[in-house]
Image: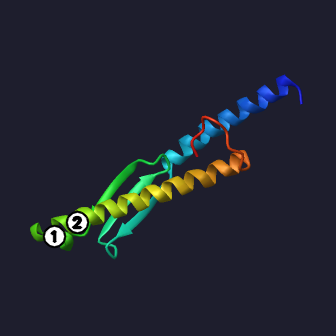
Amino acid sequence: MDLTAMMKQARRLQEQVQSLQEELARKTVEAAAGAGMVHAVANGRQEIVSVRIAPEVVSEHDVAMLEDLVCAAVNEALRSARALMQEEMTKITGGIRIPGINA
């Protein structure tokens, strides 16, 4: 493969990665903690989109528990978002690790 062909292929891959990143921003994953009392939703860019808390969990006596549940739900949502990103990147790159692309 000559240098020109390699550059074209790299440019196509870069365009695919950019397109994937835009697509991932629209996809979401959800995780729950505390038997579903706290839900966190993250997008494929590993940003928290929303947190839902069941009304029965909110009590001034249970603030520490609620804080723990929110952390657990958010962390699980972010793990799911990272897994989604890795899965989608693998489809494009065929599993090849490309420097500068976080997947």
Distance from label 2 to label 1 (Cα)? 6 Å
The picture places residue 39, in percent across and down from the top left corner, at: 34, 64
Kind of element beneath mark 2: helix
Viewer-side residue, 32 vs 23: 32
Outermost residue, top side: 4
The picture places residue 42, in percent across and down from the top left corner, at: 42, 54
Which residue is painted at 81% across and 29% down in the image?
6
Which residue is painted at 50% across and 52% down in the image?
27
Would residue 14 appear left or right of 62 to someone viewing this image? right
Viewer-side residue, 90 vs 24: 90
Q: Amino acid at mark 1?
A: Asp
Q: Amino acid at mark 2?
A: Leu
Dot 2 surroundings within 10 Å: few (below 14), some, or many (20 or more)?
Answer: many
Q: How many marks?
A: 2
Which residue is painted at 74% across and 49% down in the image?
94
Q: Name the residue tied to disc 2.
A: 66
Which residue is painted at 84% across and 24% down in the image?
3
Query: Which numbered tag is attached to residue 41?
Result: none
Would residue 51 appear left or right of 83 to someone viewing this image? left
Kind of element beneath mark 1: helix
Q: Are marks 2 and 1 in contact (CB under 8 Å)?
A: yes
Task: Please state, as top left, top right, bottom left or bottom right, where the N terminus lies in the image.
Answer: top right
Would residue 60 appear left or right of 82 to someone viewing this image? left
Outermost residue, right side: 1
Q: Name the residue tied to disc 1.
A: 62
Looking at the picture, does residue 68 appear above or below residue 47? below
